[in-house]
C-alpha cells in the first residue's frame, strides 16, 4: 500500500518560522513535491525534491531524506498570506506511468 | 497566457443524471489528470492520461469515465453510478512524465447533487 502522513494543523505568528513534516510509504518512489492551496482555490506548485537534501526557493525550502522516507517544508518570515493548506505529494512511477499521490494536507494559520 | 480552463465553475446535478466536466489546456502538456477533493481532505486521483487515446484508472475511478481524443482536452463524466459525487473536482496537467516542473491545476468545478 501507500501512505503519506502530515500534521493536520499548524499555527504560527507573523515573522516566525514553521516546519511541516511529511513521512511516506510507497513503492516506485520518484520524488516529493509540495503544493499550497488557499480556501476555494486550486493547488499551486511550491517545490520538488528528487534527491536528498535541501531545495530553497525564496522564503520556502523543502528537504528530502529518501533513506528515512521523510521530507519537510520550511516556511520563513511568515506572512498572513501564507495562511493556507499545504500538501506533500509523492511522485510514484508504476507500470510506466507517473502519478502524484497527495497527503491529507496541513492547514497553516498565521496570526498577527 | 497558457493555462488550464475548467468549466463550469459550479454544477448542480439531480440524482440519477450523468454530467460532464470540461478540462482544456493550451500548455502543450502531454499528461493530464483528474482529482477529487472532499472538504478538509487531500486530493484523490480519479483518472489520468499520459498521451492521446490512452488513459488509466486512478485510485477512485468507479462511477467516472473519461476520454482523451485531443491533446488539449480531457473531459470527465460523473455517471449515476457514482454514489457520492458532491465534491470539488480539479483537473491538472504536467509538462513532463517525471513531473519535475510540478502540476498545473485548473480552478476547479464544484459539483453538488440536489
Image (spheres, helix red, strand yellow):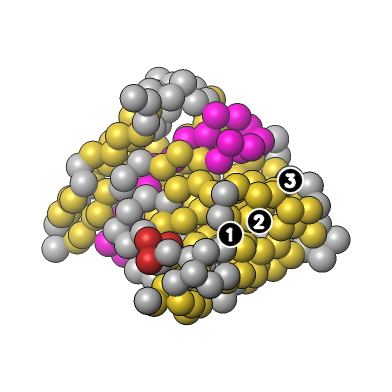
Earlier residue among tags 2 and 3: 3
**Is residue B12 or residue A70 the one in the foreground?**
A70
Q: How crowded is mark 3: few (under 14 residues within 10 Å), some or many (20 or more)?
A: some
**Chain of the residue where label 1 is placed in the rendered structure:** A
Q: Quadrant location of the N terminus of chain A? A: bottom right
Q: Nearer the viewer, mark 2 or mark 3?
A: 2
- Asked if A25 appears above or below B46 in the picture, the reply is below
Query: Do the residues at discs 2 and 3 belong to one chain?
Result: yes
Residue B71 screen position, x and y as percent: 44, 21
Residue A107 placement: quadrant? bottom left
| Residue at the image position 65 percent from the left and 49 percent from the top | A56
Mark 2 = which residue? A62
Q: Residue A88 has which mark?
A: 1
Mark 3 = which residue? A50
Earlier residue among tags 1 and 3: 3
Residue A112 screen position, x and y as percent: 37, 76
- Asked if B89 appears above or below B74 in the picture, the reply is below
Q: Give the range drawn in magenta.
A: B80-102
Q: Is residue A112 left or right of residue B21?
A: right
**Is residue A65 or residue A89 the one in the foreground?**
A65
Residue A57 screen position, x and y as percent: 60, 47
- Asked if B3 appears above or below A99 in the picture, the reply is above
Amino acid at each position: 500500500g501507500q501512505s503519506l502522513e502530515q500534521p493536520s494543523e499548524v499555527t504560527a505568528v507573523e515573522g516566525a518560522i514553521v516546519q511541516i513534516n511529511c513521512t511516506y510509504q510507497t513503492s516506485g518512489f520518484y520524488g516529493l513535491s509540495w503544493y499550497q492551496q488557499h480556501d476555494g482555490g486550486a493547488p499551486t506548485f511550491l517545490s520538488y525534491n528528487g534527491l536528498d537534501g535541501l531545495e530553497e526557493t525564496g522564503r520556502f525550502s523543502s528537504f528530502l531524506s529518501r533513506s528515512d522516507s521523510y521530507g519537510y517544508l520550511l516556511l520563513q518570515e511568515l506572512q498572513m498570506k501564507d495562511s493556507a493548506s499545504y500538501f506533500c505529494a509523492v511522485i510514484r512511477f508504476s507500470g510506466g506511468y507517473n502519478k502524484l499521490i497527495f497527503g491529507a494536507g496541513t492547514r497553516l494559520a498565521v496570526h498577527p | 497566457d497558457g493555462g488550464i480552463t475548467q468549466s463550469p465553475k459550479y454544477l448542480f446535478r439531480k440524482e440519477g443524471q450523468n454530467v460532464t466536466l470540461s478540462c482544456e489546456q493550451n500548455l502543450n502538456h502531454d499528461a493530464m489528470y483528474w482529482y477529487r477533493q472532499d472538504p478538509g481532505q487531500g486530493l484523490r486521483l480519479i483518472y489520468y492520461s499520459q498521451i492521446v487515446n490512452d488513459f488509466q484508472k486512478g485510485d477512485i475511478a468507479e462511477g467516472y469515465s473519461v476520454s482523451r481524443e485531443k491533446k488539449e482536452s480531457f473531459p470527465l463524466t460523473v455517471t449515476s453510478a457514482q454514489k457520492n459525487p458532491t465534491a470539488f473536482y480539479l483537473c491538472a496537467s504536467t509538462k513532463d512524465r517525471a513531473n519535475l516542473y510540478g502540476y498545473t491545476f485548473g480552478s476547479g468545478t464544484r459539483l453538488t447533487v440536489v
